[in-house]
Amino acid sequence: TDTKQVMIIEGGPGTGKSVLAINLLVALTNESMTCQYVTKNAAPRSIYATKLKGDFKKGRIDNLFKGSGSYTETNADELDVL
């Protein structure tokens, strides 16, 4: 829809929240949506980016993974999904 929505995924460690987020990132990116995975912890961002690099350019993959402080000067509606 054209209406902004929020989905909160709850669960303890090891329940698949990050796996779900990565799968959504892939699916929505394949739908030509501008998406980013946001976490305050740099370790998972680094691991996911390294695993996904393959044939893609470094900048393209690194742009998918951001820290929560990255959005202080982001324009409204610049991204489709966070």
Image (spheres, rainbow, N blue to C red):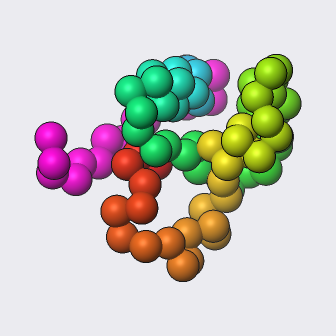
Residue at left offset 76%, top offset 28%: 56
Q: How many labels does the image show?
A: 0
6 is within the stretch colored magenta: yes
Q: In this view, does 74 lie above or below 81?
A: below
Q: Residue at (54%, 79%) from the top-left corner?
A: 73
- Residue 39 placed where, x, y %? 63, 50
In the image, residue 74 sits, relative to residue 24, either above or below, namely below
What residue is rendered at 63% in x and 69% in y?
69
Q: In this view, does 69 lie to the left or right of 58?
A: left
**Which quadrant holds the N terminus?**
top left
The x, y position of residue 5, in whole percent, is 23, 48
> Magenta span has 11?
yes
Does any portion of residue 3 appear in the rendered image?
yes
In this rendered view, identify the residue nearer to me: 32 or 62.
32
Residue toward you, 57 or 80: 57
Residue 29, compared with residue 79, is above or below; it is above
Magenta span main SS = loop
The location of residue 42, given as percent across then percent down, is: 79, 50
Observer able to see residue 11? no
> What range is drawn magenta here?
1-14
Compared with 64, 52 (above or below) is above
User: 62 or 39: which is nearer to us?
Assistant: 62
18 with respect to 33 (left or right): right
Which quadrant of the structure image shows residue 67? bottom right
Quadrant in the picture for residue 44: top right
Residue 14: image location, x then y, percent: 63, 22
Q: Tell me the residue at 59%/50% (across/down).
A: 38
| Residue 43: quarter of image | top right
